[in-house]
Amino acid sequence: MDKRLTLLSSQMTFEADGLPATRVTESCSRVKNVDIIPAILPHGGKTRLLKTLLSSACERDCYYCPFRSGRDFRRATFAPEEFARLFMQLHKADLVDGLFISSALAGGGIRTQEKLLDTAEILRGKMGFRGYMHLKIMPGAERGQVLRAMQLADRVSVNLEAPNKARLAKLAPRKRFWEELLQPLRWVEEIRREKAPQQAFKGKWASSTTQFVAGGADESDLELLSTTARGYKDLGLARTYFMAFNPVPDTPMENKPPTSALRELRLYQASFLLRDYGFDLEELPFSADENLPLPTDPKEAWAEIHLKHTPIEINNASPRELLRVPGIGPKLAQKILRARRIRKLQNLSQLKKLGVASMRAAPFILLGGKRATQQARLF
Ligand code: SF4
């Protein structure tokens, strides 16, 4: 296997689709010395992704980044055609199903984006690759390039890195928050709304995501989740990723303490409450310092305040109310609605059979008018 691919795939330590960063290195497999990452596809199903860079030779100097210019490490670069050929070798050997490709910046965002697009076009056109492709949008890419990326890829993403302009200045002072990062994400949503999806490679527009370096800019959870909420609402993001800040040796931030994996987990949990559970930002249980409490998951912390003394009757709760109960997610709420049409739910074992984490739910629900906590002692 080409040594550059081995090098670039192992240097790509950012998190994969559907998989938090902290789990990537534990769960990826090495095939022919290339890191293959298991991932969940946007609409379910598992895949094996080659996650790599087209180049790690960056001209910029973001303070936290291992690829920053001037840092002493081995760099490598592929031309689009040679990368496409290598990828197809792996794909034809049934070692990978899909591709997540990004790049360090060389010659500006527009030129770097062009190389990524050339790679994607060779794969889709000349080489007939129809599998999953996640394409990064480079800072400063043009609208036409964003459209082209959406026509070729299943998913596109722009890393905002920080929740606002002031925080980004602490991580990457040469990146322009509004013009270079947020604007491409706005174009993605505009294109999805305005243009017919028949123009896209698979007849469906690419979904979009972003990523933050959590804790890198001393930002609060409120700042991160406020931008996350706007991303879901205004930009149609499928997901926001949080990569806990980890100091990289030989960077200006090498002595900054790392962000805990627990904070990363709480941010993910809260972002799912915003995306899938009907929570508003104002409802999340932020502490006085504008961060989420670390010891308890945010849904449980909310329920402790709001449901402990006014539990929800499972037999006549609305779908929205069911989603407020710890241990009940969107699929389980639907199951409960179906089950209670057939017969009244009167005990925790019925909920448990449906898949509900009944011990978690018990303090916050009534079953047939009775506190479920009394039954919980029997379990
Ligand atoms: S532009 Fe990207 S790759 Fe280059 S230093 Fe900044 S974050 Fe790293």
Image (tube, grey):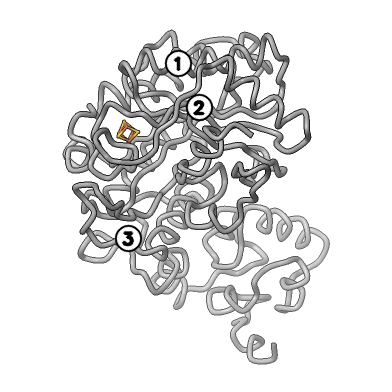
Residue neighbourhood size for the residue with mark 2, other residues' Cα within 10 Å, grouped as few (<14), some (14–19), many (≥20): many
Q: Is residue 222 left or right of residue 336?
A: left
Q: Amino acid at mark 1?
A: Val
Decide: marks 1, 2 in contact (CB < 8 A)? yes
Q: Secondary structure at mark 2?
A: strand
Q: Nearer the viewer, mark 3 or mark 2?
A: 3
Q: Secondary structure at mark 3?
A: loop
Depicted 144 relative to depicted 316: above or below = above
Picture coordinates of residue 61, whole percent (x, y):
23, 34
Q: Quadrant of residue 75?
A: top left
Picture coordinates of residue 68, whole percent (x, y):
28, 36
Q: Residue at x 73, y 15 (%)?
A: 128
Instruction: Read off the residue under disc 2.
Output: 156
Q: CA distance from mark 1 to mark 2?
A: 9 Å
Q: Is mark 1 within 8 Å of ligand 1?
A: no
Total labels: the figure holds 3
* Residue in the foreground of this view, choosing between 103 and 337: 103
Q: Is residue 13 left or right of residue 215?
A: right
* Dot 1 or dot 2, earlier in sequence: 1
Instruction: Read off the residue under disc 3.
Output: 259
* Dot 3 or dot 2, earlier in sequence: 2
Q: Residue furthest bottom?
A: 378
Mark carried by residue 258: none
Q: Residue at x 18, y 34 (%)?
A: 173
Residue neighbourhood size for the residue with mark 1, other residues' Cα within 10 Å, grouped as few (<14), some (14–19), many (≥20): many
Instruction: Read off the residue under disc 1.
Output: 146
